[in-house]
Amino acid sequence: MNTKRMPFIVFEGLDGSGLSTQSFELKGWLEKKGYEVYLTKEPTDGLIGSLVRGVLRKELKVDAKTLALLFAADRMLHINNTILNLLDEGVIVISDRYRLSSYAFQSLEVDIDWLKKINEKSITPDLTFIIDTPPLICMRRIQKQRFHIELYEEIDKLEKIRERYHELAKEESNAFLIDGNRPIESVSAEIFKNVKELEILEGLE
Ligand code: 2DT
Ligand code: MG
């Protein structure tokens, strides 16, 4: 049992901005350094997360406030059933999306102060990387990957969400806005540089 709690690292941004790619790259890089790493995502593939995915695919309809509560409940379960246990066991946890997704996406329709309130018991990540990629590029990538269009996937909405992320980058502690409109390796290099500065991983080369 490791006595130091390991870092909790989060990736945020628009869909198609390269979150999954960068989470995966960071996992591989840390594993090569000898760390045990668990890659997870929100919405989760648990019971509440699956319900949320149904809403995103427009298979079931719930109002915006209920959806915000479902995301918050999925997150609380994720923290208490998975994230905290792993961090305490000496595992680095990387999550593809976390609470800033709720603040950036749900605030299109729901008051942001209330969103922050229903998420106030969520732990603060040690690092949050917001991958910033122009919406048009994200939309093109999404269209290449699949046929259906999910909730929020309209250019004007994505523009607004991107602006929210810019504001959130200034507010959230330990958050970095990373230019995602570059080759994968350049984006990763900037991320690794910031991870190296985490005190608990001291000595990381
Ligand atoms: P991906 O699985 O492709 O990342 O899409 N979302 C996610 C929210 O609106 N609020 C949240 O709190 C979270 C975690 C963003 C997931 C979609 O769900 C949205 C894109
Ligand atoms: Mg997606």
Image (cartoon, rainbow, N blue to C red):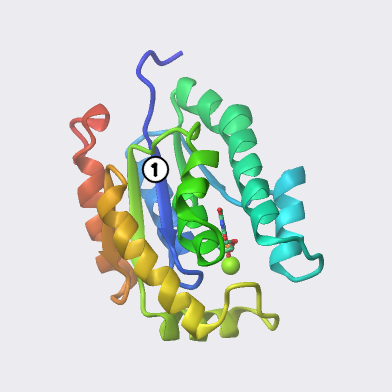
Residue topped by disc 1? 9
Q: Please state, as top left, top right, bottom left or bottom right, where the C terminus lies in the image.
A: top left
Residue 96 visible in the shown view: yes
Q: Residue 115: image x %, image y %?
A: 51, 48
Q: Which of 128 and 26 is in front in this view?
A: 128
Q: Residue furthest right?
A: 60
Q: Which of 14 and 25 is in front in this view?
A: 14
Tag 1: amino acid: Ile
In the image, residue 156 above or below residue 37: below
Q: Which residue is drawn at 46% across and 30% down?
A: 91
Q: What element carries label 1?
A: strand
The image quadrant in which ligand 2 is located? bottom right
Q: Residue 82: image x %, image y %?
A: 59, 32
Circle 1 crowding by C-alpha within 10 Å: few under 14, some 14–19, many from 20: many
Q: Residue 201: image x %, image y %?
A: 26, 31
In the image, residue 140 above or below residue 49: below
Q: Residue at x 56, y 79 (%)?
A: 142
On the image, which quarter does residue 59 sit in? bottom right
Residue 95 visible in the shown view: no
